Each structure stands twice: as C-alpha cells, then as structure tokens.
DNA sequence: ATGTCTCAGGGACTGAGA
C-alpha cells in the first residue's frame, strides 16, 4: 500500500503529469498541494476516470490542497480547527485501504518568505496551531499520516549548502524546532526510518539550473503515527517528474506501508 | 545574476508569491 505527496505548482498546468504518474506508480493515496485553482475548476472528472476519488479545498491563484484516494474519502475536514485562516492549506479525510482505515492529513505549510517577514510570523503561528490540533487528532485517529509540503528542511543534511542556508527561511532554528515539535507528538519521518543516499532532495529552485546541479532541499515529508510507522517498508523521492518539460519545482515523496 | 515559473488583471506587460 502506497501513500504519496506532491506539490504540483498548479494542478491545471500539471494535470497530465499527475495522471501519468498515477498510472505508473499507482499509489493508494496521493496528496496534492498548490492547486492554484477554485473548487469549481477542480478536474474531478479526469481524476475519477483515472480511478481515484478526491477531497479538495482550493482558492483562486494561491494555495489549495487535495487528497486523491482509490476509496471514497470520508469525514472530510478543511483547515485546522480553531485556527481561522482564509488560505486553503490543509485538508483531512479518512480513507479505506487494504490495510484498514487511515486518517490522511494533507498540508501546504506556509513558506514564510524571509525570517524578517510578517509571513514568517504567520508560518510559526500556523505551525504552532497545527501541532496543538494534531495532538487531539492523534488521539482520535491512531493510524494517521501527515503528508505535504512542510516548507522546512529539518536538518543540515536536507540542504545542498547548509552554510549558505543557515538561519534562512526553510532552515531557521524556530522552523526546525517546530518540525521537532511534530516529531514530539510521536510522529516519525518516514524517509529517515531508512538508510538513504546523501544529497536526496524534494525541491529545487527553477532558477540557476538548480535541478541539474542538484541544488535542492528536502522540504516535502511524510510523517507517520506509531501505529503506521511500524509497518512502513520504504520511503523514496521520485525525481523523474522533475525531469519532464514544464515540471513542478517539487518531486513526489512516496511511502510504502506493508 | 533581480537568474524561473505561475497566475491575475486586462488585453502588453507588471507584480505577487514561491
């Protein structure tokens, strides 16, 4: 059973790549971020024709998240309960799989822009609200996975040039502390449960030929509750879609649960 | 190297966000 996450940077532009990727990798669940479209423009027919159901929460131009699932998502919730936010950044649903019920939380966490920006303060508030809300969700749903674009590189080994990025947004100490706060809830970074090669990343800037030079960061993650983590058999980042014409700047992350 | 990509507004390009 496979669950995956991919920041597609416009679902309208990337839909053909998403449909191809679903056909090749056949995940049971795929979480998408940065849809950049309103719900009335969500390509539900094409996704259903590919054999998936969907729960989605979008808005014009920015943000937007979706959960694609082989089974019909149920108990769909939008946003972080208790945190008012006009930005559509989080959606949760329960899905049925061969391994039973899973609670899926799909998140597009704030970027923060730079550490002296108001957007950075919003990011830290958002992360604090997420953490407190998740504490209760984990009580309600012991089999929970938090997938998405975290916009946080948790450690220096997740950064191609840690000295250049030191104290910059995506790498700053408060952001990394917030990430460890999620781990402190009992969640486990699926990717780091396994031996991995060095210099594996999930995002590369469109500029500076960054992908070709592997100047990337690992900011897309799959965190698993203890009941799921013990059954996780693999976690990989699929760079192949990043090599296509007109790619997203992010690559998908996939976890295998056995 | 303010370097690329996407979207909206408006109807060519600029600005915002990432």
Image (cartoon, coloured by chain):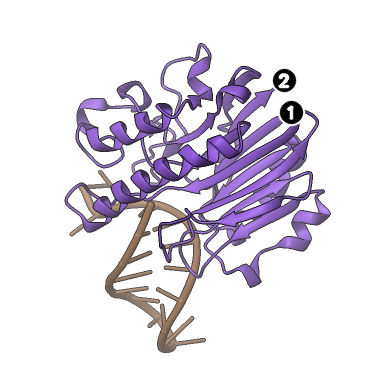
Chain colours: A purple, B brown
Residue at x 67% of width, y 24% of height = A256
The Cα atoms of the two marked residues, 2 and 1, are separated by: 6 Å
Residue at x 71% of width, y 54% of height = A54
Quadrant of image for the C terminus of chain A: top right
Point out residue A244 in the picture as x, y percentages from the top left corner. Answer: 59, 43
Instruction: Left or right? Give the position of A163 relative to A155.
Output: left
Instruction: Left or right? Give the position of B1 relative to A22.
Output: left
Q: Which of the 4 image quarters holds residue A85?
A: bottom left
Label 1 CA crowd tier, 10 Å (few <14, some 14–19, many 20+)? some
Point out residue A64 in the picture as x, y percentages from the top left corner. Answer: 52, 59
Q: Which residue is mark 1?
A: A1
Residue at x 73% of width, y 61% of height = A44
Q: Which of the 4 image quarters holds residue A22?
A: top right
Q: Is residue A55 above or below residue A212?
A: below
Mark number displayed over residue A235? none
Q: Is residue A228 above or below residue A84?
A: above
Whether residue A153 appears in this view of the structure is no
Q: Secondary structure at mark 2?
A: loop
Residue at x 31% of width, y 39% of height = A170
Q: Which residue is mark 2?
A: A258
Q: Earlier in the sequence, mark 2 or mark 1?
A: 1
Point out residue A73 in the picture as x, y percentages from the top left corner. Answer: 72, 50
Instruction: Left or right? Give the position of B8 relative to A26.
Output: left
Q: Secondary structure at mark 1?
A: loop
Quadrant of image for the N terminus of chain A: top right
């Amino acid at each position: 059973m496979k669950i995956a996450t991919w920041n597609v940077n416009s679902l309208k532009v990337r839909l053909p790549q998403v449909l191809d990727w679903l056909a090749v990798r056949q995940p049971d669940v795929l979480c998408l971020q940065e849809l950049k479209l309103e719900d009335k423009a969500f390509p539900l027919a094409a996704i259903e024709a590919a054999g998936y159901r969907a729960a989605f929460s979008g808005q014009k131009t920015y943000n937007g998240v979706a959960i694609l699932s082989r089974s019909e998502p149920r108990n769909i919730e939008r946003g972080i309960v208790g945190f008012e936010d006009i930005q559509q950044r989080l959606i949760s649903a329960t899905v049925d799989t061969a391994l039973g019920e899973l609670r899926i939380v799909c998140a597009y966490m704030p970027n923060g822009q730079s550490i002296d920006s108001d957007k950075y303060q919003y990011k830290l508030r958002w992360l604090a609200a997420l953490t407190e809300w998740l504490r209760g969700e984990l009580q309600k749903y012991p089999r929970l996975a938090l997938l998405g674009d975290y916009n946080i590189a948790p450690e220096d080994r997740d950064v191609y040039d840690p000295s250049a990025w030191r104290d910059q947004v995506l790498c700053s100490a408060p952001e990394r502390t917030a990430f460890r706060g999620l781990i402190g809830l009992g969640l486990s970074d699926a990717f780091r449960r396994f031996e991995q090669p060095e210099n594996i990343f999930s995002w590369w800037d469109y500029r500076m030929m960054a992908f070709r030079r592997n100047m990337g960061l690992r900011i897309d993650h799959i965190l698993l509750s203890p009941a799921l983590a013990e059954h996780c058999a693999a976690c990989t980042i699929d760079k192949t879609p990043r090599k296509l014409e007109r790619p997203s700047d992010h690559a998908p992350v996939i976890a295998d649960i056995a």
